[in-house]
Amino acid sequence: MTHSHNSHINNSRIKMAAEPEYESILCVKPDVNVYRIPPRASNRAYRAADWKLDSPDWSGRMRITAKGKVAFIKLEDKVSGELFAQAPVREYPGVAVETVSDSSRYFVLRIQDDNGRSAFIGVGFGDRGDAFDFNVALQDHFKWVKQENEISKNAHLGDSGPKLDLGFKEGQTITLNIGQGKKRDKPRPQGSGGFGLLPPPPGGKIAPPASSGSSNHNTVVQTGGMATGCLLELDSSNSNTVVQSNPTSDLLWGDFSAPASSVPPPSQPQNSSNWIQF
């Protein structure tokens, strides 16, 4: 079973390799004339006037095809399509197709047979437009061939050229500066009276301001005059503490109360009506 499967794959590869390359048609001209031409004199261009233009040796159809990068000029019978001769063209202008010095309607082709033998014949078009189309078809094809060769060359150079190495070498380090931007000063929170609050004194525990009638003890702080600040040291042994600063202080401190756990309750009667009320 495995041997049969491998044989099928090998046969498929052989079939794909044996398939002919796609052939496209570049130009078709239904009427051309073919002439026998005399041997070319050395260092002299071909001249159509040296041919017997009034009595062509063959007349038929011309088809220009392309298979890969090679173009083929095929001379075929008008009715049956039988091939009379063909000229493989691998470059243009080149030895396979040459112009004549005295006319734009005539060309010299180098035809080849299956055995590789070659001969030179003259071909001519009755209309200048047909000669122009013949010329442009070959030029366009070999312009495409040139572009394909350049693309292949650049791709080959890109693969074989030096590659950029972005890896770290041995012992190489990199330094990153993170969070080094300029820090903005955060605005201090403002009290209800528009004055900034100073930080609490070191070592002291300050509870939030007491509401009226809910605190177990009372602390009154009065400030005023020229003093810029006053640090309060709360006496935990006395729940009713009054601290007075310079009457010229220009900063107003809020009411603070020590935690109930750190201040013992005052020795007062059990009657709650004797508590100090504000």
Image (cartoon, helix red, strand yellow):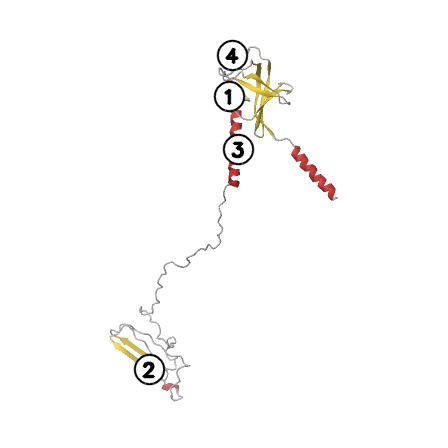
Vertical relation: 155 (above or below) 169: above
Mark 2 or mark 1: name the one nearer the start of the chain: 1
Q: CA distance from mark 3 to mark 2?
A: 100 Å
Q: Nearer the viewer, residue 264 or 142?
A: 142
Mark 4 or mark 2: name the one nearer the start of the chain: 4
- Residue on which disc 2 sits: 241
Q: CA distance from mark 2 to mark 1?
A: 116 Å
The local crowd at label 2, few if under 14, some if 14 to 19, many if 20 or more residues have their Cα within 10 Å, is: some
Marks 2 and 1: CB-CB under 8 Å?
no
Q: CA distance from mark 1 to mark 4?
A: 20 Å
Mark 3 or mark 2: name the one nearer the start of the chain: 3
Residue at horizontal 71 percent and vertical 41 percent from the top: 6
- Residue on which disc 1 sits: 132
Marks 1 and 4: CB-CB under 8 Å?
no
**x and y, in percent, of residue 102 in the image:** 48, 15
For badge 3, the amino acid type reads Asn
For badge 4, the amino acid type reads Ala
Mark sitting on residue 73: none
Circle nearer the viewer, 3 or 2: 3
**x and y, in percent, of residue 153 in the image:** 52, 35
Q: CA distance from mark 1 to mark 3?
A: 26 Å
> Where does the C terminus fall, quadrant-wise?
bottom left
- Residue on which disc 4 sits: 49
Residue at horizontal 71 percent and vertical 39 percent from the top: 8
For badge 1, the amino acid type reads Phe
Q: Quadrant of residue 178?
A: bottom left
- Residue on which disc 3 sits: 149
